[in-house]
Amino acid sequence: MIGVGSTVGAYEIVAELKSGGMAHLYLGRRQGPAGFSRHVVIKAVKGHLSSHSDFVKMFLDEGRIAARIQHPNVVRIEELGEHQGLYYLVMEYVHGAAFSEMLQGLAGMERRLTPEAAVALVANAAAGLHAAHETLDERGELLHVIHRDVSPQNILLGALGEVKIIDFGIAKARDRLHVTDASGGLKGKLRYMAPEQLLRSGIDRRADIYALAVVLWESLTMRRLFEGKSDAEVIKRIQEGQYPPPGAFADVPHELDTVLMDALAREPEARPPTAREFRQQLRNAVPGATNIEAGDLAALLWGVVGDRLDDRASRLPPGSAKTRQSIQLEQQPEDMVARLTAPVGHAFEDASTVPSTFVPPKIDSAPQPTPEYYYPEHTPPPPVSGPGDDLAVPLERPSQTDDFGRPMPQPAPPSDGSGSLILVAIVGLLAGAVIVLAALLFFG
């Protein structure tokens, strides 16, 4: 068995990091001469699944595929092994938090990332994705790797400002041991799936680009791009392919709106052909993103979820994880939160300022479920309308309270025009009476 205190290959298991439904994550340590010591993550298959051939094949595929991807924006796989009948992966250890956790933290602070910060983070992730897409086999041929599960949960933000793609467990690639046939279930998180992925038709790297664009859209707006009361409703909205750009909800440059909406195109042919091209387009649209360095991102992470990082480190052996006191940040966390985030709730006050790329979303006005981790819906933007007001619909209903929970005055219900008609009739009667009276006086 693999557990805390046991030795797996050259590694001693010193702590359990996490236990999921299919695998355990342990903190391992390798020691050598002259005081050499290095920590790693060991991902081990749960015992009851070791006899499940399909799962074992998927696990082996993850190791085989990810081990070939060598890039600073992808978590490195160091070893694939077997211990007493259980398979395990040895991976690079990065103390940090998932992008989804940062979004949760920002939601609690009622703030969102600036376009510069969001693009800086996503551009790093795009670099890692491109490296995965370009991975070659031992013959120098493309493996055609597709992650298939790009989401905030699978983008890791390190304590030193690293941005890394993780979890290639359901990645698609040539020569996989495990093959999902057409009758298999959907692979990935529903709200980040490209339309062609939902149809289970042939997909390529552009499905990952689409998913990364959804991640960016949501990080800019702190809203769900696709929400619904059921999975069927979410699927329908994804397939319809009509939604507003982030600029309808936040202060986003028009150039970024254009790039993002191209990446979210329903047809793969209309999207950027590669993650590298998408990354370059993002950086061209928001030049300020290139000035944000790893030290800035590290300070931002500690400013948003620093307490959570310190709490996790306190549960591990001393010296195995970075703490706020053990690292030298180049910037103050509070300064980076002020510089790289903005209050949530800003929307275009006037319809004339809505970007020309805006497409009225085809949604009803029924209340939507509360998002899993985004800013509460009590300060929605005003309804957005344009030249075709009959096509535009309210994006969300106005709330009953302000940011601090105080009651807000409710607007008077719209008039149906009956008052104006009555006033016109009264004026007409008075004018007629004056004319009649004048005629009587004139003719005696």
Image (cartoon, rainbow, N blue to C red):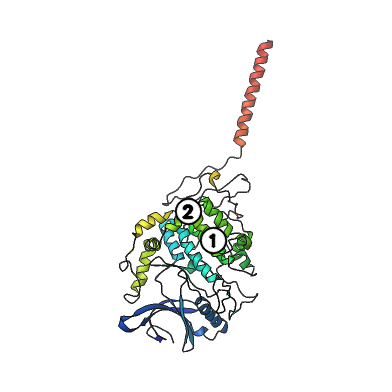
Q: Residue furthest right?
A: 443
**Closest to the observer, 259 or 187:** 259
The amino acid type, in three-letter code, at marker 2 is His
Residue at screen point 52% across, 85% down: 50
The amino acid type, in three-letter code, at marker 1 is Phe
The answer to whether 174 is drawn above or below residue 100 in the figure is below
Q: Residues within 10 Å of mark 2 (few under 14, many from 20)?
A: some
Look at mark 1 in the image and give the residue it sits on.
278
**Closest to the observer, 408 or 335:** 335
- Chain-order first, disc 2 or disc 1: 1
Look at mark 2 in the image and give the residue it sits on.
378
Q: Residues within 10 Å of mark 1 (few under 14, many from 20)?
A: many
Residue 91 visible in the shown view: yes
Residue 70: image location, x then y, percent = 48, 73
The answer to whether 326 is drawn above or below residue 263 in the figure is below
Residue 248 visible in the shown view: no
In the rendered picture of this protein, how many numbered marks are placed on residues? 2
| Quadrant of the image containing the C terminus | top right
**Closest to the observer, 436 or 47:** 47
The answer to whether 221 is drawn above or below residue 200 in the figure is above
| Quadrant of the image containing the N terminus | bottom left
Residue 144 sits in quarter: bottom right
For marks 2 and 1, give the one nearer the viewer.
Answer: 1
Number of the label disc, if any, that sits on residue 300: none
Give the Cα separation between the discs numbered 2 and 1. 33 Å
| Left or right, 175 with reference to 347 | right
- Tell me whether circle 2 and circle 1 mark residues in contact (CB < 8 Å): no
Residue 172: image location, x then y, percent = 58, 74
Residue 269: image location, x then y, percent = 63, 62
Circle 2: element type = loop
Residue at screen point 46% across, 47% down: 408
Circle 1: element type = helix
